[in-house]
Amino acid sequence: MADAPNYIAESEHFRLYCNAGDHDCGASNDPALAQHSREMLDNMEAAYAWLDDLGFPVEESHLERARSDRKFRLRLDPNSAANGGCVGDACTDVSGADSKLLIPKSNVAMAANDPSLLAHEFVHTLQRAVDVRGSDRFWMDEATATAIGTSFGTKYGYGVDLYEPKYYMSFDRPFYDVVSDGYGNWAYLLGVGQNLGSRDMVAYLSKPQFLNIEEDFHGASPSALMDLLYDKDLVGGLTFDQESPKFVAKMNNIEPSNDPGDSAYHYYTDIEDHTVSIPATDASHEERFDGSALTYAVAPMRLKLDVTAKPDAEPRDTLMMVDLEVTDGSPRDDLTLVIEHKQADKPLQETLMLDGSNPPDELGFVRVVNVPSAAQGDASPNRFELEVRARPIGLDPPGCLRAGEPAGFAARGFDPEEADNWRLEADNGTTDGLSVTPAHSGEVNVSLEVDSPVTRGQTGLEPVTQETSRVELGRFKVAQDDCMVRLSVGPAQATYTSDGSYTEYRTPSGRALYFKQGDIAVYKQSGWMPIPAPAKQMVIGRISGSPLMGGLAQGALKEDADTEAILPAMPLEFSRRFSWKNIRKATLLSGKKTQRSAAPCPGGGEGCTETVFRMGPHAIPIIYDAQDRPLRAVFKNQPVEFAYGTWPIRRPPGW
């Protein structure tokens, strides 16, 4: 075809013609049109250079050329779509031997201002010289061109990083089963490029396999193209089974669609709503929900939450762990659990801490992703069960806190590593997991912060700041020196220290016995008594085997009691044994309900409670402090006093 003299503008590699008659589409009388035409060619030159630099075969483009100087021809189309003109912002006509790239005259300003538009269309001319629009393979061609065009537009400031493809994407359909062409799937290709570290996120798409789809997959089913996304050499090891769950997690959005004809939501045809109803926070609860996900697709579920806690329960007594686990999939290994923006720590299970006194409205937006480890044929359903298990947990405070020394809360009913939506906070010192290290003596207030699992916003894809529930665990005294527990019966005192882990048994006469594991010391007014090793073992054996120690060892809930182990830590051991947690457990095991009421604190203070525990025929009144530690227990009219703090006690030589 001989060049017509009526081109509108030209650049180094491109020339813009009018696609009607032998005139210039009015550019000679329209300065704005002429200016936009030149700007379009500037964009084309920039796209050409960029693609060439990334390794795309730009000189192999099927775009029509001028015979004289081999410049690529672009066409400005003055006809509207209704009159047979270009349909869309720009078009690539690949019906002939050479491709034609047309820009509607009415859209020339957009094409000049949006560099991604013509870059997208030029990529189509690198892909094929036959018309495949509407074919089963077109989804990958369109996804590739849109990814590359979007990257180019982002590079020139038209877009911002990763994208929000609200059109033509439904994750609950197989990835290749697109609503219209392949618009939407481009976002996945950009995500792979970003994670791969590919230049501008798209350099890896310059490989011939992504551009020669019609030749390599002619006559194949649309699912056959998934082979490309599983080819480790093409995607740098980031295969679809590895990357798809991450991509689904990123696309955390349940906004209703503007056009509900095809899909009720932007990214999902529909979403299953379920309600998890937990009737009590002091008992375990379990629910199951059936679901099904097609191959290369997801099953979306929104888990609403309804929790009933006892009205008079302290918030710290309503804590729970909730496990969400995918079970019974066939095959189960093809499934992955995604909650909100997060891929589950374990592929099929996620665990969350829950404040039952102030629970979130949801456990989150859950997607079960069905991606096989290797590409396979057409989609088939994978039916599964989502199990939700809730169980009560607790945090028991350390017996004593010491300035500058870490002390750990004890986890009751859970492993601290199984959930990551919680943390301890202290107003004195620092925390690390369950450990609290007060900075100075005095007091420390310790609280638990529990984050809601919901991270999606009302709109968009970016995570939002989670709502947080705060649970007060208590205000605790902080000792400057040793952390100690003292047990007093009349004038006799036994004081345990964690510094060396031994106990001093002292009488008003000044004489004292000291026990640590496997050792004993005696102090009289004249000083420390020398005791030969055989004599030490004999004394330990006699005391441990006495009827008194045998009786003490059989206290509340003490299984397999070791009297030799009790001696070095008797005050601490009995403080734990008669703690509210232990007494409540013993009462529940006997088939009775625990009851306690407010009581005056011995020695002053606030927050004390009282209960009565029955040990055989004996009723034992027990008073607790605000941290549920025993302060006083009465055995057969004999008060036994407990205290927590620091006192000056002797340390035997060598201990």
Image (tube, rainbow, N blue to C red):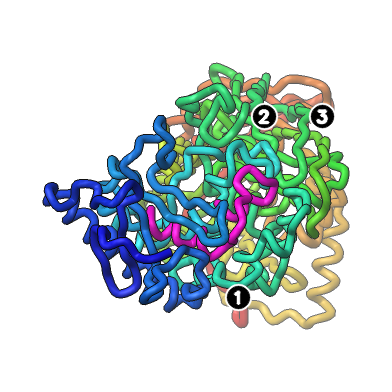
Q: Residues within 10 Å of mark 2 (few under 14, many from 20)?
A: few
Instruction: Give the answer, above or below, for where 112 lies relative to 308.
Output: below
Q: Where is mark 1, residue-wise?
A: 652
Screen quadrant of the C terminus: bottom right
Q: Residues within 10 Å of mark 1 (few under 14, many from 20)?
A: some
As drawn, the label of residue 589 is: 3
Asked if the residue under mark 3 is in contact with the one under mark 1, i.e. CB atoms within 8 Å, the reply is no
Looking at the rendered structure, the kind of residue marked 2 is Asn
Q: What segment carries the magenta color? A: 116-142
Residue 572 visible in the picture: no
Residue at mark 1 to residue at mark 3: CA–CA distance = 42 Å
Q: Earlier in the sequence, mark 1 or mark 3?
A: 3
Q: Residues within 10 Å of mark 3 (few under 14, many from 20)?
A: few
* Residue 355 image position (x, y, % from top left): 55, 33
Q: Nearer the viewer, mark 1 or mark 2?
A: 1
Q: Earlier in the sequence, mark 1 or mark 2?
A: 2
Looking at the rendered structure, the kind of residue marked 3 is Leu
Q: Residue furthest top?
A: 311
- Is 135 covered by the magenta stretch? yes
